[in-house]
Image (cartoon, helix red, strand yellow):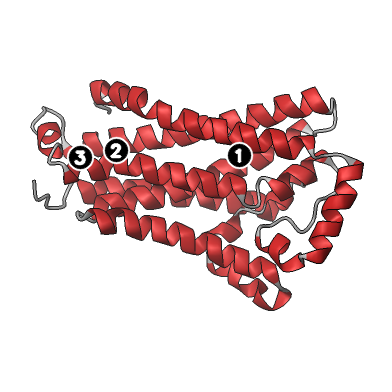
Amino acid sequence: MLCWPLFQREMRANCKVMLIFCGVFTLYGAVIISMFDPKLGDALNAMAASMPELFAAFGMSNPGATMLEFLVNYLYGFLFLVFPVVMILILVNRLIVRYVDRGAMAWLLASPHSRRTLALTQGKTLGLLVLMLTVYATVMCLALSQLMFPGALETGPFLQVNVGLLGMLLFFAGLCFASACVFTESRFALGVGGGLCAAFLLIRMLGQVSEKLDFLRWLTPTSLFDAYGIAAGDPGALAQTGLLYLGAAALFLAGIWRFSRKDLCL
């Protein structure tokens, strides 16, 4: 059950934010895809050899021999995780935190809709915008790859990777949403969820720098997103993707439950 007037208003207002990040994705996607060239590949390998720790930290140590491996390495190891987290934080602020800070939540609560309905509406808005961004990234990469290097990208495995990416991004969205619903003060509402997402990504980066720190990767939920395993159809990697979706659903539900019961100083 949704508050449709609120849902429509939020979609109109926040689609602009998503479109900005679609533009960022297009910029980086076009640049990276255009670099899939054997001659440039040799130059990239030379750069990676000169700065192995830096390339490894950003998940770019293995350029791969195919277009799929190339994209997974240069886009899905870092860029397509970090930029969406920034978008998620902006959206959570606009959908939940800002209403409480400005006292506008009182007007929403005065409507005939329950707290649960309002929180569910905002949560579905956030989830849908994350889905739309992921779908755009998928279509954009497929279109640009076909335009620049016809037939080079394996469509089936690439779609599987993006299903895994969506699970990871929904998990981040659920974490930030739950944080905003649990805490009333904006510094905690955004800081806890955003801080955890940043910590998970930083630990992932540290774990990729050297084999000695590899164990760090398994201390965060980001280890469940194994893009190479998903592309290869590995059952373990696919099962981990399922866990991300379950975790995302649990976080959204926990946030809705907490919002419907917490005290709001309005």
Horizontal placement of 71 versus 239: left or right? right
**Type of amino acid under label 3:** Tyr
Whole-number angstrom distance, CA of label 1 to CA of label 3? 32 Å
Residue 29 vertical position relative to residue 262 in the rendered view, above or below:
above
Residue that label 3 marks:
99
Q: Residue at x 69, y 31 (%)?
A: 141
Q: Secondary structure at mark 3?
A: helix
Amino acid carrying label 1: it is: Val
Q: Residue 150, labelled with which disc?
A: none
Which label is found at residue 95?
Answer: 2
Q: Is residue 4 above or below residue 200?
A: above
Mark 3 neighbour class, 10 Å CA radius: few under 14, some 14 to 19, many 20 or more: some
The one nearer the camera, 107 or 116, is 107
Gap in angstroms between the C-alphas marked 3 and 2: 7 Å
Left or right: residue 68 compared with residue 197: right
- Which residue is at a point 73% across and 55% down the rendered structure image? 60
The residue mark sitting in front, 2 or 1, is 2
Sequence order check: which comes first, mark 1 or mark 3? 3
Mark 2 and 1 residues: CB-CB less than 8 Å, in contact?
no
Q: Quadrant of the N terminus?
A: top left
Q: In the image, which is nearer the foreground, mark 1 or mark 3?
A: 3
Q: CA distance from mark 2 to mark 1?
A: 25 Å
Residue visible at 81% across and 58% down?
47
Q: Which mark, residue 163?
A: 1
> Hey, what amino acid is under mark 2?
Leu
Q: Is residue 241 visible?
A: yes
Horizontal and vertical percent for residue 246? 47, 49
Q: Position of residue 206 (x, y in %)?
A: 61, 69
In this rendering, position of residue 118 left or right of residue 13: left
